[in-house]
Structures are given as structure tokens and as C-alpha cells.
Image (cartoon, rainbow, N blue to C red):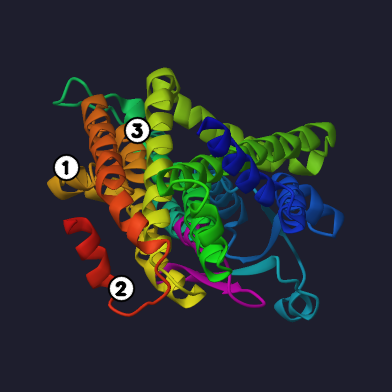
């Protein structure tokens, strides 16, 4: 029995690995991941520049250049936008318009007897929303500064007005820390990127095991296999082979990412320093939240939950695929699984929005989506380790039910070659 099981596992695994499309797909994945890790260098080689400063030409008819330059520099730094270069010019508006590039702006400052300052912003087209907000804030702050100066306020008092307010935070909940204040924003943007590979691999697993069983049925190869081994051995072999294949693919993705990171390190390009600085700032912000200290507990638990979820996905996909007779039936039966997984991914992306909601905590226990949603909620502090353990127990129970009752459907379905009364046959198999 063990020899037959191993033979089926080896045969199924080799069919996937030695397939030329597997080689081609992984070659493409390697190129794509290396390119993504070095996208800024590639763009710079093609003529782009991540560190190129957006030039702002100021036509100063209000004697306010120094004020507006100070404010733009200040607000752009606060917003992590350091690509503005403010330049005072003696050229006319007409002259500047002739050769204005898309990455260049013109600001015309004029005096106004009532509103203190009249400003016109000239661009070739639309500008980035964040850039617009920075410029708008800087211009309004310049107007306020002009109004104060023209009001003959004492210089010392004026300095106190401009002095930034030191905001002191006080929490009624003593367990809260100031470093964790931005945790939700960070994790709702960073964490979905981390769980994206799991989401993609789970979809790939469902399609792989489903298409293989469906292919064996449509080619009538299933009859030959089942005449030599029991349906239980066949089903177990498919589950083992497909999961080994997915785990190997996950390891390859990790290796490809490492190669991309290594290429980035070896190709030291000063152009990419700005991007690396932003990544470093994000990592520093995450480190301040204390997340890295929890990884020793989080990673093993989350990995266990993900592995169990992969097994459950493969069981469900195999059971449903056994009842199909053609590719169209397979596509219809797989669609609900993909929709559920997609719902879990989007819920994880929006996890920070549902803080304190009971329903999101309940959803973290739901099989299939728990592996995507629970880690996000755990890092955000909306669930604890106990909740993750509950999700694991629910997942184990789900696998047990699939094995106990799903095998009945699988036994009935693998030699069924008609799609008539499909659901009736499934329920009849469960009853029996």
C-alpha cells in the first residue's frame, strides 16, 4: 500500500514539476520578481529618475519668495516629499510657459490689498493630489505669515507664533504606546502585500488539484487507477503531491525574492537611494510598534494555520473536482472557493477599519479566510493568540469533516461520468 501511495505521489508531483510550462512560468516569475525589486534602477536606465526634483518657478511680484520657499520646503519634508526645488525667476509667465515640462510648475505671486496674496499655479496638466495639498498648505501658510507681518506684530511674538507646537500624548489606556499610534496605517498597507503570496498560492492549489482530477476523469484514466488502488489511496496521493508542489513553489518564490534583493545590493545605484530611504523609514516605523518582537510567536502559529488551510483547500477542491465531468463544471464548482478566498484577502486589507467590531473577530474563526484575516488582526491587536488557536482548532475540525464525509462524495464522484443531478448525488453520498 505504501509503495502504491508513494508511486502515485511521485507520478503526480513529477507531472507538475517536469512540465515545460512549469519551467517557463517560473522563469517568468524569476524575471518579474527581480525586476520588481529593482524597478527604480530599471526606470532610471530607461531615462527616469526617482530623485529628480520637481522644479517650481516662482514669479515673485509680492516680495514673498523667501516665505513661500521656506513653507514649501517645510511642508514637503513633513509629508516625506523632498523632490521640490523652488527657484526664483525673472522670466515672464509667457516665457516660462513655452518650455514648461510636465514635472515643472509655475507659481505667480501678486499682492492683494484685501486678501494679502494672489497666487496662480500653472502646470502642463494634472498634478499629484499629495503634491497639490502640500503646495496649497504652504501657500495658505505664506498668506497668514504676510498678514501677521503687515500687522506690525512684535518680532518676539511673531517667533512664538511660528514656533511648532509640541504635542504631548496622554492615554487613558495605560497599555497603549505612542509608537503604536500609526500601527494600523502601516499594517493595512504593508501586511496585505505580505499575505499576497499565500492568497495566490491557495488559488493556484485549488486550480491544480481540480484540473488534475478532472483531467484523469475526462481521459478515463481514473478507471485504470482505481482498478489498482483504493479511492482513499488515490485521494491521499493527490493531496500530498499537490501540497508538496505548492510548498516547493512557495520556497521558489522566496528564493526568487532573495535573488532580486541580492541583485539590488550588488547593483549599487545612487538613483535608488531615495527609494531605499523610504523603505528604511517604513521598517523603522514598523519596528517602533514592537511587531518584530512578536514575530517569534506569530510566525510559527500563522505558518501552522496556513499549512492547515492549504490542506483544507486541497481536500475541498479534490472533493468537488471528483463530481465534475468537464472543464466547465470544474470552473463552476471552483468559483465559490475563489470568491471566499478573495473576500478574505480584501477583509485583511481593510482590517484596520473594523477595529472593535465583533463580526470581524468572528470572521477570523471562519475556515479558509482565517489564514488570511487572523494574522492581520493579530498584528493590529484586534485578536490575541487564543483567537488564533481557536482558528487553528476550527481548521482542524474542518479537515476532519472533509476527510470523514468528503471521502464519501469522492468515492461516488470519481467514477461518475454524468453531470445530471450532480448535487443530489453528492447529498446521497453523504447520507450513505
Looking at the image, which is closer to me, 285 or 326? 326
Magenta residues? 109-138
Query: Could you tell me which secondary element the residue under label 3 belongs to?
Result: helix
- In which quadrant of the rendered view does residue 137 lie? bottom left
| Image location (x, y in percent) of residue 89 | 74, 63
Quarter of image, res 324: bottom left
- Reading the image, the residue beneath label 3 is 379
Among the two numbered marks 2 and 1 on one chain, the one whose residue lies closer to the N terminus: 1
- Which of the pair 391/162 is nearer the observer? 391
What residue is pinned by disc 2?
Answer: 422
- Work out which residue is located at the far front of the displayed protein and give it: 227
Residue 407 magenta-highlighted:
no
Q: Residues within 10 Å of mark 2 (few under 14, many from 20)?
A: some
Compared across the picture, whether 3 is left or right of 50 comes to left
| Image spot of residue 381 (x, y percent) | 27, 32
**Above/below status of 282 relative to 342:** above
Image label count:
3
Does dot 1 land on a helix, a strand or a loop?
loop
Q: Residue at x 31, y 33 (%)?
A: 378
Dot 1 corresponds to which residue?
A: 356
Q: CA distance from mark 2 to mark 1?
A: 42 Å
Identify which residue, 266 or 53, lies in the foreground: 266
Q: Earlier in the sequence, mark 3 or mark 1?
A: 1
Circles 2 and 3, Cβ within 8 Å, touching? The answer is no
Percent from the top left, x then y, of residue 360?
21, 48
Q: Residues within 10 Å of mark 3 (few under 14, many from 20)?
A: many
Q: Give the residue drawn at x 28%, y 35%.
A: 396
Asked whether, in this view, residue 208 is left or right of residue 41, the answer is: left
Using the image, determine if residue 173 lies above or below residue 367.
above
Amino acid at each position: 500500500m505504501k509503495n502504491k501511495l508513494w508511486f502515485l505521489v511521485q507520478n503526480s508531483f513529477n507531472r507538475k514539476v517536469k512540465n515545460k510550462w512549469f519551467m517557463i512560468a517560473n522563469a517568468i516569475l524569476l524575471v518579474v520578481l527581480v525586476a520588481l525589486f529593482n524597478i527604480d534602477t530599471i526606470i532610471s536606465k530607461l531615462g527616469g529618475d526617482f530623485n529628480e526634483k520637481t522644479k517650481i518657478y516662482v514669479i515673485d511680484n509680492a516680495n514673498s519668495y523667501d516665505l513661500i520657499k521656506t513653507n514649501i520646503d517645510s511642508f514637503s519634508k513633513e509629508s516625506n516629499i523632498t523632490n521640490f526645488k523652488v527657484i526664483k525667476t525673472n522670466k515672464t509667465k509667457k516665457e516660462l510657459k513655452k518650455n514648461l515640462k510636465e514635472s515643472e510648475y509655475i507659481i505667480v505671486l501678486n499682492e492683494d490689498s484685501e486678501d494679502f496674496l494672489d497666487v496662480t499655479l500653472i502646470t502642463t496638466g494634472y498634478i499629484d493630489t499629495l503634491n497639490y495639498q502640500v503646495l496649497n498648505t504652504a501657500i495658505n501658510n505664506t498668506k497668514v505669515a504676510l498678514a501677521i507681518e503687515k500687522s506690525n506684530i512684535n518680532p518676539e511674538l511673531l517667533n512664538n507664533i511660528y514656533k511648532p507646537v509640541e504635542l504631548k500624548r496622554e492615554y487613558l489606556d495605560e497599555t497603549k504606546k505612542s509608537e503604536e499610534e500609526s500601527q494600523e496605517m502601516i499594517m493595512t498597507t504593508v501586511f496585505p502585500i505580505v499575505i499576497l503570496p499565500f492568497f495566490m498560492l491557495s488559488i493556484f492549489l485549488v486550480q491544480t488539484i481540480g484540473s488534475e482530477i478532472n483531467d484523469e476523469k475526462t481521459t478515463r484514466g481514473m478507471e485504470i487507477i482505481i482498478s489498482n488502488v483504493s479511492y482513499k489511496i488515490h485521494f491521499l496521493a493527490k493531496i500530498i503531491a499537490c501540497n508538496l508542489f505548492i510548498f516547493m513553489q512557495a520556497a521558489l518564490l522566496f528564493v526568487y525574492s532573495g535573488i532580486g534583493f541580492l541583485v539590488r545590493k550588488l547593483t549599487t545605484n545612487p538613483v535608488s537611494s531615495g527609494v531605499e530611504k523610504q523603505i528604511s523609514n517604513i521598517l523603522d516605523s514598523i519596528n517602533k510598534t514592537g511587531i518584530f518582537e512578536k514575530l517569534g510567536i506569530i510566525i510559527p502559529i500563522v505558518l501552522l494555520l496556513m499549512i492547515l488551510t492549504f490542506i483544507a483547500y486541497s481536500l475541498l477542491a479534490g472533493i468537488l473536482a471528483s463530481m465534475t465531468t468537464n472543464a466547465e463544471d470544474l470552473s463552476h464548482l471552483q468559483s465559490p472557493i475563489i470568491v471566499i478566498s478573495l473576500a478574505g484577502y480584501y477583509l485583511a486589507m481593510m482590517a484596520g477599519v473594523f477595529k472593535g467590531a465583533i463580526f470581524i473577530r468572528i470572521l477570523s474563526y471562519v475556515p479558509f479566510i482565517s489564514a488570511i484575516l487572523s494574522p492581520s488582526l493579530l498584528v493590529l491587536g484586534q485578536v490575541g493568540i487564543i483567537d488564533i488557536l481557536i482558528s487553528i482548532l476550527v481548521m482542524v475540525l474542518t479537515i476532519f469533516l472533509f476527510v470523514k464525509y468528503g471521502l464519501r462524495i469522492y468515492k461516488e464522484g470519481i467514477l461518475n461520468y454524468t453531470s445530471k443531478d450532480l448535487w443530489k448525488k453528492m447529498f446521497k453520498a453523504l447520507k450513505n
